[in-house]
Image (cartoon, rainbow, N blue to C red):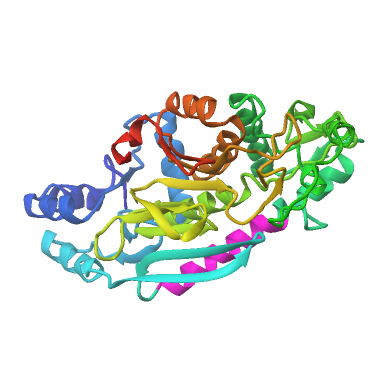
Amino acid sequence: MVFSGSDWCLPCIRFEREVLHDSEFKTFAEQNLQVKILDFPQHKKLSKEVVDYNERMAATYNPQGYFPHVLLLDHSGKVLTKIETAKATPQSIMEQIKPYLQPKVLKEFFTELILMGSAFRITLVADENDGDAYLKESVDKIKGIEGWLSSWKPNSITSRLNEEAGQQPVQVTDEYYQLVRRCIGISELTQGAFDITFNGLGDLYKFDKKEHELPDKSVIEEYLKHTGYQKIDLLDKDKMFFTDPQLKIGFGAIGKGYAAEVVKQLMLKKGVPGGVINASGDLTTWGTRVNGEPWKVGVPDPDDNTNILLWLPMENKAIATSGDYEKYFVHNGMRYSHIINPKTGLPVVGSRSVSIISNSAELSDALATAVSVLGLEVGMDLVNQMEGVECVFIDSNRNLHFSNGLKKYAY
């Protein structure tokens, strides 16, 4: 990062001419650096956008207003060193930079713990000196999200909305507001198959793998009167209101995917070259393993999740799986999944497992639930119309079905 005065600062002009324009230095920079020149001319006119950006950078990296002022930063914006420019030659500048270009010793770091009521496994490819700190930062981020998103936390934003938003508008954070906006968008896309307002319908059932009777139809209908994403009003200035005082929301069908995606983006900003954030099968990946191999994700057998039916390479993709592996009950010989159809109030039948692959763990998480509700034909048709989204659907007979982009895995 070079702070320069290109039409008045003689040392700046000399540095640019003798160093930055030197052919040897230019080759060195092309292989190792990104050179950013922040110009503060006295006569030359720059656009308002450039002036504003340069001034913001100066406020952070050059508040004293030195010229020339040359800094070496890493990809996260951390200052590694100040480059001495007095009597500088291309060779002297390169010698100052080279010690910071030594290859890092990368390792795979991982941790496993219960967060958001689910088993999280976080795997990061990082420098041996940074990995543990990045793991802690990832865990802290998820704990923070759980604190304001979970409906089980009495002081969370969700709990406050469920208590107050049916009486008066409630102020929320912009992050929360935008998440709810995206949830409503997915509800509209899936014609209500995904809906954060059916929270509470699960209380009607016991998904303990045993034989149970279905609740009376009138009981289900009474519950359904107080659901529907259309009853969420998104007001100006990050305020929300429920038009039904008994409406409740919950993020069980998207929260883990959202948290995984947030952590991925955080680690990318930190310069972590690869990793997997796995929230009980809802996971997102980026980069590669230390040995350069792609991350691989298995689609498990719905009758034995230790048996992998299909391995999929995952390159900067996310996958989420919804199924009845652990939570279900039986009625009249029919197996009912813990996934509930928001329209009927009944648990899903006909799908043993739905895995959605996309560019976002948040989207994959939500669509895995929605496609389970929509069923094979309608759900797969929706997926095939969405760019960058793929699906593996295992039906009640354990047959595998693939979206168009994955048909090469059919057998």
In this picture, which residue range is highlighted in magenta? 130-147
Which picture quadrant has residue 131?
bottom left
Percent coordinates x, y for residue 302 in the rendering: 51, 52
Residue under the point 51% across and 26% down: 377
Q: Residue furthest left?
A: 23
Residue under the point 45% across and 70% down: 110
Percent coordinates x, y for residue 316 in the rendering: 37, 47
Quarter of the figure with the C terminus: top left
Q: Does residue 90 appear in the picture of this structure?
A: yes
Q: How many marks?
A: 0
Percent coordinates x, y for residue 258 in the rendering: 57, 47
Residue in the foreground of this view, choosing between 154 and 218: 218
The reply to whether the magenta stretch includes residue 139 is: yes
The reply to whether the magenta stretch includes residue 97 is: no
Q: Relative to 386, is 274 on the left or the right? A: left
Q: Is residue 362 above or below residue 155?
A: above
Residue in the foreground of this view, choosing between 314 and 70: 314
Residue under the point 84% across and 36% down: 247
Residue in the foreground of this view, choosing between 330 and 305: 330
Predominant secondary structure, magenta span: helix
Q: Relative to 185, is 131 on the left or the right? A: left
Q: Relative to 177, is 130 on the left or the right? A: left
Q: Residue furthest front?
A: 333
Q: Does residue 64 appear in the picture of this structure?
A: no
Percent coordinates x, y for residue 88 in the rendering: 17, 62
Residue under the point 73% across and 29% down: 343
